[in-house]
Each structure stands twice: as structure tokens, then as C-alpha cells.
């Protein structure tokens, strides 16, 4: 800005335009940083939620398997399902060992009483085997119910984690929209400020033309700004 330009009003509005440019640069920087903060927060939060989902996965799988086996045991999946449940029950840890222990105890009792050759021994063995199986089967079903319930709880927690993810994405989407609106309004203000500076500068040149015209005794048209 020269002394003469300032004196004649030719620098009018230039400071306003310079400030508008600075404001535009500041808004651009703020936009980059602000969106970066939102993106970073979203990525970190989503990462933690996905990690939690991974922790629930094993319980979901075992719970589903237990629920399927319960349906087999109840006959809901037909003869094939019932056969699968029976096979799984008999293969359960400790079942065969416990059955053998009970049968051996019955045989020892019969031997002590001199009844090994008695027909009652077979009946006793059958009764002991049936009672042991029924008791073990009831325990096995209760274990399935517990495992299925654990899976149901994990499924509920999983659904909650997915809901939190959905809320997170909705929240950050809203933050982006709000932030973008703020930046847009700021840029519009800077554009208006720049235009106002340009108008002030043009008015300075027009005023100079009118002043020179008056001094010369007539109006001197100034290119672009009228007479």
C-alpha cells in the first residue's frame, strides 16, 4: 500500500480481501483437521467394538451347537437328529467310565452275596445301567441348556455391539454433516468478505474518477466503473 494510493482511496477494500483470503486458508486447514479427528475417532471406536464382537464369537458358536443338540435330543430334527444326540451323549466325557464303575459295583455286590450265577444279576445290571444312563442324560441335558443360555447371552451382547456400531456410524455421519455445514457457512462468509473488499476497492476508483472529473470541470468516465 503506497502513500498516494492510500491518500486517493485506491487501496480501499484490499485489507478486507487479504483478510478474507487468510480466513479461507484457515477454514481449509480446519476442515482437514476436523474431518481427520472425526475419522480417527470413528476408526478407533469401531476397532474396539469389532474386537468385542470377536470375543463373543466362540460363545455364539458353542451356544448354537448346544441349541442344535438340544433340538436333536427333543426329537425336533427327526430320527437322524435323535441318533446324533444319543451318540453325542454316549461319547460325553466320563459317561462310559461312570457306567462301567456302576456295573462293576453291582457285580461285586452280587459276588459278595454269592449271586453271580443268579438270573437276578442280569436284571440288576440292566436296572443299574438304565438308572445311571437316565441320571447322566438328565445332567447332560442340563449342561446343554446352560451352554445354550450362555450362547444366547453372547448373541444378545453381539447384537448390542452391532447396535453400538450402527449408532457410531450414524453419529459420525451427523458430525460430518454438521461440521461440513459450519465450514461451508464460514467459506460463504469469507467469500462475502472478499466481495465486499472488491466493491470497496471499485468504489475508491470510481470516487477518484469523479474527483478528477470535477477538478477538470467535467465528469471523466473511468473504465469499468461508469462516469
Image (cartoon, rainbow, N blue to C red):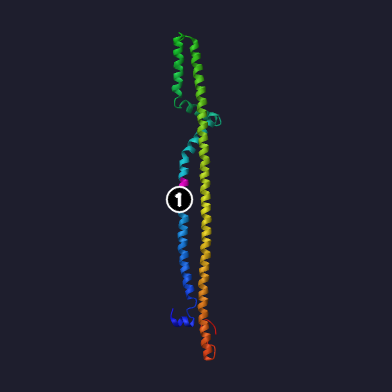
Helix or strand or loop: what does disc 1 sit on? Answer: helix
Assess whether residue 187 is covered by the magenta stretch.
Answer: no
Q: Residue at x 46, y 51 (%)?
A: 43
State the image coordinates of residue 207 (x, y, percent, origin top left).
52, 83
Q: Quadrant of the N terminus?
A: bottom left
Report the residue at 51% width, 54% height from top.
172
Q: Badge 1: how crowded within 10 Å, few (<14), some, or many (20+)?
A: few
Question: Which residue is painted at 53% across and 88% down in the image?
Answer: 213
What residue is pinned by disc 1?
Answer: 44
Question: In the rendered image, is residue 221 in sight?
Answer: no
Q: How many marks?
A: 1
Q: Is residue 47 magenta?
A: yes
In front here: 85 or 29?
Answer: 29
Residue 59 screen position, x and y as percent: 48, 37
The residue lying furthest to the top in this view is: 114
Residue at (48%, 73%) from the top-left corner?
A: 17
Asked whether 223 or 1 is in front, the reply is 1
Task: Check the image and report above or below for 176 versus 144.
Answer: below
As drawn, 154 above or below 82: below
Q: Is residue 24 above or below residue 89?
A: below
Classified by dominant secondary structure, the portion drawn in magenta counts as: helix
Taking the image as drawn, is residue 205 in sight? yes
- The C terminus lies in quadrant: bottom right
Q: Which range is magenta?
A: 46-50
Residue 180 rendering spot, x and y as whole percentages? 51, 61
Residue 195 location, x and y as percent?
A: 52, 73
Amino acid at each position: 500500500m503506497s502513500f498516494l494510493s492510500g491518500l486517493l482511496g485506491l487501496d480501499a477494500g484490499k485489507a478486507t480481501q487479504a483478510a478474507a483470503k487468510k480466513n479461507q486458508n484457515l477454514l481449509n486447514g480446519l476442515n482437514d483437521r476436523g474431518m481427520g479427528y472425526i475419522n480417527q475417532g470413528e476408526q478407533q471406536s469401531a476397532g474396539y467394538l469389532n474386537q468385542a464382537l470377536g470375543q463373543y464369537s466362540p460363545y455364539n458358536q458353542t451356544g448354537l451347537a448346544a441349541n442344535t443338540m438340544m433340538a436333536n435330543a427333543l426329537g425336533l430334527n427327526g430320527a437322524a437328529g435323535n441318533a446324533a444326540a444319543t451318540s453325542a451323549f454316549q461319547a460325553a466325557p466320563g459317561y462310559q467310565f461312570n457306567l462301567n464303575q456302576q456295573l462293576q459295583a453291582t457285580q461285586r455286590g452280587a459276588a459278595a452275596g454269592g449271586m453271580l450265577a443268579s438270573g437276578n444279576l442280569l436284571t440288576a445290571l440292566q436296572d443299574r445301567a438304565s438308572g445311571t444312563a437316565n441320571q447322566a442324560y438328565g445332567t447332560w441335558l442340563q449342561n446343554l441348556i446352560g451352554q445354550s443360555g450362555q450362547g444366547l447371552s453372547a448373541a444378545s451382547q453381539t447384537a448390542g455391539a452391532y447396535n453400538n456400531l450402527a449408532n457410531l456410524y450414524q453419529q459420525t455421519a451427523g458430525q460430518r454433516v454438521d461440521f461440513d455445514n459450519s465450514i461451508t457457512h464460514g467459506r460463504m462468509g469469507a467469500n462475502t468478505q472478499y466481495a465486499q473488499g472488491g466493491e470497496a476497492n471499485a468504489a475508491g476508483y470510481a470516487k477518484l474518477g469523479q474527483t478528477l472529473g470535477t477538478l477538470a470541470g467535467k465528469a471523466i468516465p473511468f473504465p469499468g466503473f461508469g462516469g
